[in-house]
Amino acid sequence: MFVLLGFLLIGAVLGNIVSLICQVLLGPEGMEYSLVLSYPLMFLPAMIFASHRSSSLSMNHEGVKLNNAHFAPFGAVVCALAAAAVTVSAAFCAEPVVTLLPQMPAWLEETLKGMTSGTIWVNFLCVSIFAPIFEEWLCRGMVLRGLLAKGLKPVWAIALSALFFALIHANPWQALPAFALGLVFGYVYYKTGSLTLTMLMHFTNNTLALVLGHIDAFKDAETWMDVIPGGAYWAVFAVMAALTVFILFIFSKIKLNDPKGNLDPVKSIFE
């Protein structure tokens, strides 16, 4: 896990170098468009290391599949709809924690707004496509899957992967809600083994933020508290909290094939 984090930092340095080159060559607009190159590049060293490591271990060791599909008794469609809904409700419930933090620095606020209110196709590609694919591959596919396969108690594996997910966001204003969502994503992955499903959840969260960032009424709002009046906000919060608990209860009904989680085994090459 720490090695992956180290390679991610190396990738981040490479991505920043690419961003600076683009800015020098293309001017201010180059910084925005450079995300299309720098974001995937950030994950490339970790992906190369993981691919090499997996290839080496597959020669003599059993493993578990990266992406599985344990949706019984509900089916893939119901699980997908439930996963999208619990993402929205859990994100809403995580918001009050962020309000306890000090004011976000202006430079960070502008950076985050630029990721959801700039050129739409660049935002969509980076926020709604790249982020769900690469971050879920890393945090659930590599970290959580590895911890579960090693036999770590599931509650700790899910918590550690959520903490890892929080850390890669590199600031508390994103890290705290990321940790909360990471717990939900992790539990869904533990029960279904489906990386596709957690990518859908991540896509739902990020795309909602992207859509709201392009609506004038929401552009200056930092939280839903700025949009929904006090009493109504807490009423909505109660509904969202109940919905989160209910949907997680639904996922709890998916039977586990193994205490480590619904991760299908993969035989070694020489077996």
Image (tube, helix red, strand yellow):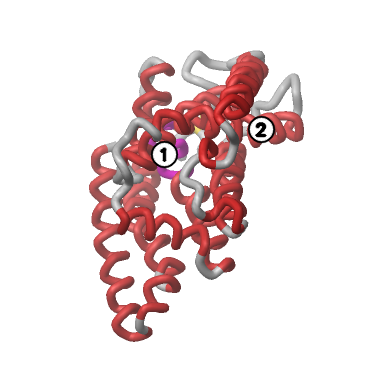
The residue segment tinted magenta is 136-145
Is residue 140 shown in magenta?
A: yes
Q: Where is 46 relative to 266, above or below? A: below
Residue 264 visible at all: no
The single residue placed furthest to the bottom in the displayed view is: 25
Q: Tag 1, which secondary structure?
A: helix
Q: What residue is at 41 percent from the left and 55 percent from the top?
A: 112
Which quadrant of the structure image shows residue 252? top right
Q: Which residue is mark 1?
A: 139
Mark number, residue 153: none
Are circles 1 and 2 on residues that touch, CB within 8 Å?
no
Q: Amino acid at mark 1?
A: Cys
Q: Which residue is mark 2?
A: 85
Q: Is residue 30 left or right of residue 247?
A: left
Q: Amino acid at mark 2?
A: Ala
Q: What residue is at 47 percent from the left and 30 percent from the top?
A: 94
Query: Which of disc 2 and disc 1 is earlier in sequence?
Result: 2
